[in-house]
Amino acid sequence: MTRQTPADDGGRTAELWMRADVPGGGGDRQERLRERTTSVDAFADVRTRMVPDRLSLSGVAADSPGGSALRETVMDAREWAVSTGVDLGPYLPISEECSIGFEEARRVLTFPTVTLVEYDAVDDVARVTPHVDDGRVVSVEARLDALEASLDVPERVLAES
């Protein structure tokens, strides 16, 4: 199981990245997860962002305001992963690609169907799913399950004997 960060007092927000072009059936999963993420009481606000299948890390698209913001968030997510000892590589892979007509290879980021990015009260990346933690895959569904479970735990009352 992933390292848990308790939900705070409403200052925590989330962004659900949904890939624009998904394989068959992926759209249903995206919609289910969008509805579920917005219904979890752990976040003060949930935003949805459509992301491309792939984003070149250099050039016009990457330097646009949207591309630049997305690229910056991915780099923050990678820093979070290093600091917490989890691996985002399988889910936000960066690869080298050579195109016809271009002499140099370019670095390209590929997005999964759905990514949940959580922010703390000061808008720093606090968690990203999916990821791999200690050899185990932590999916968006598993993260939402953990959030719902932590919110459903009743307060413990000490009984005197």
Image (cartoon, rainbow, N blue to C red):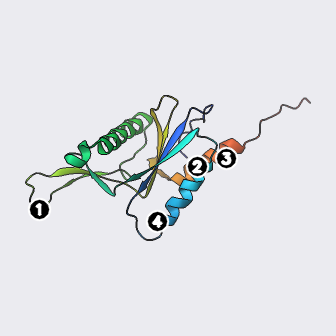
Residue 26 image label: 4
Of the residues tagged 4 and 2, which is closer to the observer?
A: 2
Label 3 sits on residue: 149
Tell me how many marks there are: 4
Q: Which residue is mark 2?
A: 38
Q: Can you identify the residue that label 1 sits on?
A: 100
Question: How far apart are labels 1 and 3 at the CA level?
Answer: 50 Å
Amino acid marked by disc 4:
Gly
In the image, what residue occupies the spot 56% across and 52% down?
A: 142
Which is more toward the observer, 117 or 62?
62
Secondary structure beneath label 1 = loop
Left or right of residue 161: residue 130: left
Q: Closest to the observer: 20 or 84?
A: 20
Q: Amino acid at mark 2?
A: Thr
Depth check, front residue: 83 or 25: 25
Which numbered disc flags the more N-terminal residue, 1 or 3?
Answer: 1
